[in-house]
Image (cartoon, rainbow, N blue to C red):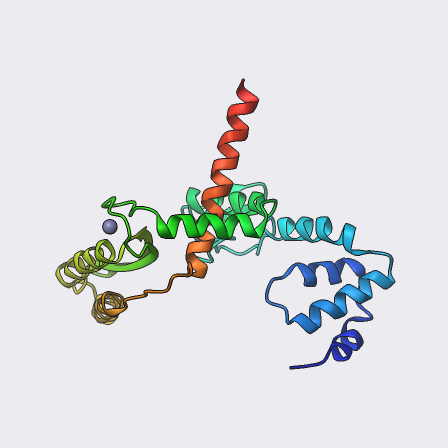
Amino acid sequence: MYPKEYFLERFKTEETEELLHRYAATDLADEAKEAIRSLLQSRGVDDSILQPLVIQARKAAYRQTKGTTECDFCGSSARFSAVLDEGQRFCSKSCLRSARLLEASEDIPKEAIFQHACRIKEGPCPSCQRTLTRIEVRPYYRVWSVGLFTQWTKRTHICCLSCGRKTNLESLIFSVVLGWWGIPWGLIITPGQIIANITEMLRSRGDSEPSAELIQAARLDLAARRYKERALQSNG
Ligand SMILES: [Zn+2]
Ligand SMILES: [Zn+2]
């Protein structure tokens, strides 16, 4: 790890706005964050105005476009059936919705999001309603092919361990039956999707803490609730 002095030296010539964008990024080392904070302080940006500026910078990041044919949210190809919104390109309405909700979620305190994730984790399974099960975000993998065309997906759902395993088994059977019939991708992708489902079925994931994916889901859920509440309020 580099000391704070290293980052002070490295960042000192950067513009204030650039520093704010850097600070708003979540994957910085503590030393780097501290260095940026002292640099900003020396330029008159103290802690009380820093936080709102950081939120602003994070929100702005959700409005950036790569300017390519890829989805500005998930990076999937969005060449043909793109959803265009305010200069950005998305592969689906759901990616557009997620980007806007995540932007709005920057106003929600981190603790509130974490608590909501814990509530989901300890609550009943959304699919089978059983309680005291290990709720998590669980992936499942499918592939199907016809001739030269092969489509493969990785999707996730929030459910208990046994519902997750059931979906993985269904997806495995789906892929075994429908995956192979495409050349060359059907033959290449199908074994991988089968193995991915089996690996997920064998994973038990008994942690009591919510995963990063579950925290992200909780963040989206809270933002959606807030959005609904506000819409109701403004309607009457
Ligand atoms: Zn997308
Ligand atoms: Zn369940």
Pick the quarter of the image with the C terminus.
top right
Q: Residue at x 37, y 52 (%)?
A: 121
Q: Which residue is drawn at 27% across and 48% down?
A: 131
Residue 186 in sight: yes
For image coordinates 63% across by 48% down, the residue present is: 59
Q: Where is residue 41 in the image (x, y as percent from the top left)?
A: 83, 61
Q: In this view, does 177 lie to the left or right of 66?
A: left
Examine the rendered structure and indicate whether residue 134 appears above or below residue 105.
below
Task: Tell me: residue 233, above or below residue 205.
Answer: above
Give 209 or 46, whichever is nearer the viewer.
209
- Considering every residue shown, the one lying at the far front of the view is 132
Q: Could you tell whether 178 is left or right of 205 in the image?
A: left
- Image label count: 0
Q: In which quarter of the image is residue 155?
A: bottom left
Side of 119 where 172 appears, left or right: left
Image spot of residue 93 (x, y percent): 43, 42
Q: Residue at x 31, y 59 (%)?
A: 139
In the image, 148 versus 9, the foreground residue is 9
Q: Nearer the viewer, residue 96 or 136?
A: 136
Q: Is residue 217 left or right of residue 15?
A: left
Inspect this view and state whether residue 79 appears. no
Q: Point out residue 109 in the picture as x, y percentages from the top left corner.
A: 59, 48
In the figure, 217 relative to 231: above or below? below
User: On the image, which quarter does residue 195 sit in?
Assistant: bottom left
Foreground: 138 or 180? 138
Q: In which quarter of the image is the N terminus?
A: bottom right
Point out residue 149 in the picture as x, y percentages from the top left corner. 25, 59
